[in-house]
Image (spheres, grey):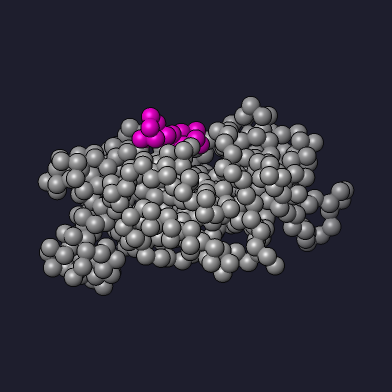
């Protein structure tokens, strides 16, 4: 079966609030399989409107009707539930990191169906050439004939999703890189560009912590349906340290897409020099590279690679464990500051120490609690996606676009 591609010159604008079809799709995403009557109650849409939107979503292959098999026959008209169809469409993505590129495919529920890593060259031109060259083979190996709805391209730092430009990633040393424009000429797919912090925040809102009870509130929207509001902060700590903020379920971008730029928050205990010319900046102090270099300087690992330090800590090295704990202590005031300033319903942390050494999460909670009166254990939790977080991040901008404006696929198919 040949690989099907849905192509448009550029991604359509994504509405801030879901329309009726999106409300139906999101209800199936949250609680499916779900009967139409339950969708009507969930969204506030009339039964006729639900039926109309369901017909559109079925035609686009975004939902399907799993046949209900009740234990005993029910009187009246049979109820046919609705659920997300994960068998027709995929989102492709690539995450650009310091050590490597991560290619991924994710289904409409945000589940990673395939991923591969490739080395990353230093210059942006070479990296984008590699993405264009490697992507077709990756899709042939793993898409399995399913349509690919778009390509997400995510990385750290300041990214402008509208222009598709990486404005600045200080860890990579890249500035003003036209990601969408360059890749558009090399692939037939729509290109969706964003920062990995915002991409993971979108994924948490759709598939993770943002859908848990207590993290969302249902309110009516102007379409007559319902939408789920969530105030969420996502904090990413890797070679880049940045945050994303969602208020009422909508990601804040700020002036020049600078919302969540916390790389240069001061760390009182730190004297680590920062490329900006100051000392004690958060990213320069707690980034993967900074911690790994500290481990080399203290003779714990032979090379400045965080996985080596985590492996040593996992094998019981007290020195390695102390370096990991030190990173969490230095990070804690920034976590507390985000809790106090924003007051989110949940703060999600994507960070390798707590991901691979989950027993240290309680220690982070204790350190954060020393700097805030917020209920830290209730609010601060690790990524919903574990070691697959970067693969999920890569496809998340495509999935977010589909779930917010599913009927845009009709335009894409007719283009």
Residue drawn at x 15%, y 41% is 277
Classify residue 54 as left or right of residue 269: right
Which of the 4 image quadrants contains residue 11?
top right
Along the line of sight, the residue nearer the viewer: 229 or 279: 279
Q: Residue at x 46, y 49 (%)?
A: 182
If the image is split into quadrants, where does the N terminus sit?
bottom right
Image coordinates for residue 21, horizontal then vertical, percent: 69, 39
The residue drawn where x is 62% and y is 49% is 7
Q: Nearer the viewer, residue 411 or 198?
A: 411
Q: In the rendered view of the protein, which quadrant contains the C terminus? A: top right
Q: Quadrant of residue 50?
A: top right
Q: Is residue 57 visible?
A: yes
* Residue 364 in sight from this viewpoint: no
Q: Please state if 372 lies on the left or on the right of 83 as rendered.
A: left
The verdict on residue 248 being magenta is yes
Instruction: Tell me if residue 263 is in the magenta stretch.
Output: no
Q: Residue 316's spot in the image, x, y percent?
A: 23, 71
Q: Residue at x 32, y 34 (%)?
A: 340
Task: Magenta stretch: give its range.
Answer: 246-259
């Amino acid at each position: 079966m040949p690989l099907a591609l849905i192509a448009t010159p550029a991604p359509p604008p994504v509405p801030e609030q879901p329309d009726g079809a999106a409300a139906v799709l999101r209800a199936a995403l949250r609680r499916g399989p779900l009967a139409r009557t339950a969708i009507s109650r969930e969204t506030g849409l009339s039964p006729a409107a639900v039926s109309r939107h369901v017909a559109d979503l079925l035609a686009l292959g975004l939902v399907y009707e799993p046949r209900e098999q009740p234990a005993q026959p029910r009187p009246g008209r049979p109820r046919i539930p609705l659920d997300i169809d994960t068998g027709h469409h995929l989102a492709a993505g690539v995450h650009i990191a310091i050590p490597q590129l991560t290619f991924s495919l994710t289904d409409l529920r945000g589940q990673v169906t395939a991923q591969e890593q490739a080395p990353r060259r230093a210059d942006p031109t070479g990296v984008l050439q590699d993405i264009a060259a490697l992507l077709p083979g990756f899709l042939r190996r793993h898409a399995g004939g399913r349509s690919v709805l778009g390509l997400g391209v995510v990385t750290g730092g300041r990214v402008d999703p509208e222009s598709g430009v990486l404005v600045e990633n200080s860890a990579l040393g890249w500035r003003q890189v036209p990601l969408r424009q360059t890749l558009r000429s090399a692939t037939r797919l729509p290109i969706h560009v964003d920062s990995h912090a915002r991409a993971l925040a979108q994924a948490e809102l759709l598939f993770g912590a943002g859908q848990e009870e207590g993290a969302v509130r249902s309110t009516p929207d102007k379409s007559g349906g319902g939408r789920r509001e969530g105030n969420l902060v996502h904090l990413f700590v890797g070679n880049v340290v940045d945050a994303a903020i969602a208020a009422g379920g909508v990601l804040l971008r700020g002036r020049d897409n600078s919302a969540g730029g916390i790389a240069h928050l001061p760390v009182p205990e730190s004297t680590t020099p920062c490329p900006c010319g100051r000392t004690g900046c958060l990213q320069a102090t707690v980034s993967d590279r900074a911690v790994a270099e500290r481990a080399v300087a203290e003779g714990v690992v032979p090379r400045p690679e965080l996985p080596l330090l985590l492996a040593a800590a996992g094998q019981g090295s007290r020195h390695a464990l102390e370096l990991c704990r030190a990173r969490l202590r230095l990070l804690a005031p920034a976590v507390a500051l985000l809790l106090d300033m924003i007051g989110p319903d949940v703060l999600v942390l994507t960070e390798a120490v707590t991901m691979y050494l989950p027993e240290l999460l309680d220690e982070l909670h204790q350190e954060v609690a020393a700097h805030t009166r917020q209920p830290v254990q209730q609010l601060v939790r690790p990524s919903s996606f574990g070691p697959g977080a970067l693969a999920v991040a890569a496809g998340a901008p495509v999935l977010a676009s589909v779930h917010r404006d599913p009927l845009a696929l009709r335009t894409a198919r007719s283009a």
